[in-house]
Image: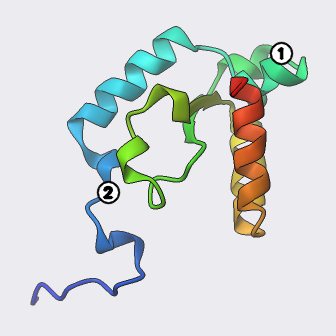
Amino acid sequence: MPNTPPKANSRKHWKDPRRLYSWTKCRNKYKEQFYCCQRCQYLGTVDRLSYENLSIHHIERVFEAPHKVLDWSNLLTVCKACKIHFDTMERQGYTEQAKQEGWEIKGQ
Ligand SMILES: [Zn+2]
């Protein structure tokens, strides 16, 4: 199969920095330090689930700000529910609000 170049506006257009080994290391280190959902902490809704199924959310999305992919000031540990919250906001086009909320949580 020929290696056709991706469309200019596709997310695959640039090499996804999340695939880098350095991202895996960065994510693990960040999770070690922030092992509880930071949004649940901010909202005061910490419960058992705030410590489980954690992922790392990029406040400024990776495709918008690839240079911030490893920048701790751009990262938030989120539980499954909070990840869905951010994903839904972004899918519905509330990307600026999602960023604002992320920065508020970070205290920036
Ligand atoms: Zn949460």
Quarter occupied by residue 35: top right
Question: Residue sitting at 71 percent across and 67 percent down?
Answer: 91
Question: Percent x, y for residue 38?
Answer: 70, 23
Q: Mark 2 highlights which residue? A: 16
Q: Nearer the viewer, residue 32 or 58?
A: 58
Question: Residue sitting at 25 percent across and 32 percent down?
Answer: 22
Q: Is residue 25 shown above or below 14?
A: above
SS at circle 2? loop
Question: Percent x, y for residue 7?
Answer: 33, 87
Residue 5 is at least partly visible in this image: yes
Q: Is residue 33 shown above or below 87?
A: above
The quadrant the C terminus occupies is top right
Q: Is residue 95 left or right of residue 46?
A: left
User: The residue under label 1 is which amino acid type?
Assistant: Asp
Residue 84 is at least partly visible in this image: no
Quarter occupied by residue 95: bottom right
User: The residue under label 2 is which amino acid type?
Assistant: Asp
Q: Is residue 65 left or right of residue 39?
A: left
Q: Residue furthest right?
A: 44
> Disc 1 or disc 2, which is closer to the eye?
2
Question: Percent x, y for residue 30?
Answer: 46, 19
Question: Residue sitting at 44 percent across and 61 percent down?
Answer: 63
Res. 86 mark: none
Quarter occupied by residue 88: bottom right
Q: Within 8 Å: ligand 1 and the Cβ of disc 1?
A: no
Q: Nearer the viewer, residue 106 or 87?
A: 106
- Callout 2 crowding tier (Cα within 10 Å): few <14, some 14–19, many ≥20: few
Question: Percent x, y for residue 2?
Answer: 9, 90
Q: Quick one: label 1 or label 2, which is nearer the N terminus?
A: 2
Q: Is residue 39 shown above or below 82?
A: above
The quadrant the N terminus occupies is bottom left
Q: Mark 1 highlights which residue? A: 47
